[in-house]
Image: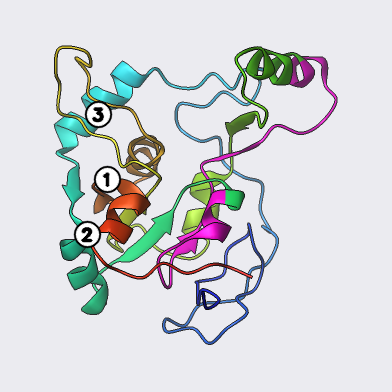
Amino acid sequence: MAAAMSLPCSAFGPARARLRHRAPLARPLQHPPRAMAGLDRSNPDGGKTDWREMYEVLTDYGIKALDANEVNRRLGRGKAVVVDVRIEKESRRACILDSLVVPLYQPISGLAPYKIARRAAFLAFGVVEATELNADFCDEVRQYIGVDVPVILVCGIGGTLEADGSYPYGRRSRSLEAAYYLLQEGFRDVSILDGGISAWGKAGFDVYAMD
């Protein structure tokens, strides 16, 4: 597959191909990151906001899950920016053209005791690659787009707020979590890709590998 022509982001550095949308090259953040709403930086486990609270905020806002065709139409009209919130390894394999790639979660690194304990806990459940919330997520998104720009968030599955017998608060996903944090930061037009990146491919739209 061709290399993805993506908007630059702090996860990957400067884009390596011509950009359809002009954007500044990635630079290190020049200001101290703000505490992300719902995340307590002093808490070793991140103090991540409870999903039920996220669900209530997202439901009150009326977050929209857009199908792949609608997302493609909005991108074609230049009416929105796609933000891919998956971890770097996933986004490198397949992403939407011109996505802004900002992982909501990142691999747990460092040798602090609580980090070692968290990696061990993940491993006990068979998860080799342990991740933690990216506390700079909102700052990294705001580095490239303003709060008035329509944002479409993409993850692997999309998630849903529709309740059923097994999931009274819908199905949690990275794109829905990211939507919650961006809304708390003042973004005014936030939606998600229904079904995630897999639905985009199933609809017949191209995905690109990042070199």
Q: Is residue 112 left or right of residue 142?
A: right
Give the x, y percent position of residue 150: 27, 61
Q: Are marks 2 and 1 in contact (CB under 8 Å)?
A: yes
Report the magenta residues as a range: 90-116
Residue on which the image places disc 1: 195
Residue on which the image places disc 2: 68
Give the x, y percent position of residue 118: 69, 17
Q: Is residue 206 left or right of residue 86?
A: left
In the picture, residue 172 is in which quadrant? top left
In the picture, residue 15 is in which quadrant? bottom right
Q: Secondary structure at mark 1?
A: loop
Query: In the image, what residue type sits under mark 1?
Result: Gly
User: Is residue 112 in the magenta section?
Assistant: yes
Q: Secondary structure at mark 3?
A: helix
Residue depicted at x 64% and y 70% = 211
Please report whichever mark, 3 or 1, sits nearer to the chain's N-terminal start. Answer: 3
Report how far apart the C-alphas of labels 2 and 1 lie in the structure: 8 Å
Query: In the image, what residue type sits under mark 3?
Result: Val
Residue depicted at x 27% and y 57% = 202
Q: Is residue 210 left or right of residue 30?
A: left
